Amino acid sequence: MDAYTVSAEFYDVLQGRDERERAERLFASPARRARSGIVEVGAGSGLVTQVLARAATVPVHAIEPNPAMRALLMSRLAAAPTEHRARVTVHPERVQELWPRQDVPQADLAVCSNVIATLDPGQRHGTWAALARLVGPQGLLLVDPPPCALPEAPRTKVLPQVPVGDDTYSGFLSETPETDHIHLEYTYQVHRDGELLREEREEFDLWPVAGEELRQELAEAGWVVCRPSPAAPGRGELLTARVAEHL
């Protein structure tokens, strides 16, 4: 639960514009076609939630167990138009704890944006099974596929520089392959007049899974893959699956 306490301050500033544009491109149209409800796993700061609420005409169940990110999500909803905010229910539980409850109506669309790779194999299996029961037969799943494999060597990505008042927010991301996961370290920096005011760090882990193994996991949970994970998934590509009719 301590995760994201550092990144919550920097996430929207450094990555929000790209994430919002991507959400509009990938999730707005499916949200418009939803007929009973939408479940979003890992709503985070609410960038995707905002797109879903604006596009949909059905209830949106935004699942975000992390307190730091949920605070950003609630702030975003507080500033949203009344009709959009009325559509969204925020759940602080994990999806595995949510699906047996009778007060959560069944949905026909599940969205997992930028979250599945952060789940270890046990959490991932539980998520697939819970979602299959929340959306029911023929329900649609849209998910960012996790990396297919570990990177061959450590690598670094530079985050954009974003001015905020007199300050410039920036940073970089380091990825290091470990035995069975990828270790991430975000370094955030704030400069003023060229001087470094402060520097903050936060670490996460990502869990790769090969495409065929991912397909098997989904099948065991009752999903039929419509569009599989590509060999080297990029941030613009989604895995699409439907719940089997007999579930």
Image (spheres, rainbow, N blue to C red):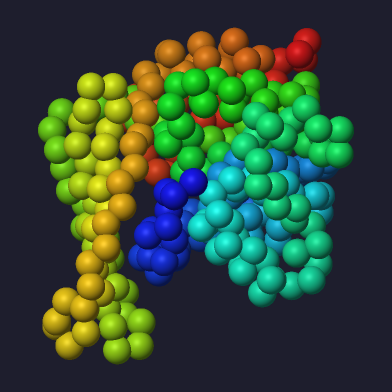
Along the viewing direction, whichever of 239 and 114 lies nearer the viewer = 114
Quadrant where the C terminus sits is top right
Left or right side of 227 for 105: right
Location of residue 118 with respect to 190 vertically, above or below = above
Query: What's the residue at 40%, 44% (across, down)?
Result: 235
- In the image, 75: left or right of 243? left
Q: Position of residue 61 (x, y in %)?
A: 72, 46
Task: Identify the residue at image location x=43%, y=44%.
Answer: 236
Image x and y of residue 12, in percent = 44, 65
The quadrant in which residue 168 appears is: bottom left
Percent position of residue 181, x then y: 30, 28
Vertical comparison of 167 with 8: above or below: below
* Res 49 seen here: yes
Residue 93 percent across, percent down from the top left: 66, 41
Q: Give the quarter of the image for residue 78.
A: bottom right
Q: Is residue 220 above or below residue 56?
A: above
Q: Residue at x 52, y 56 (%)?
A: 69
Residue that appears at 73% across and 43% down:
38
Asked whether residue 55 is in view, the answer is no
Q: Nearer the viewer, residue 123 or 141?
A: 123
Q: Measured along the vertical axis of the image, is residue 19 above or below residue 120? A: below
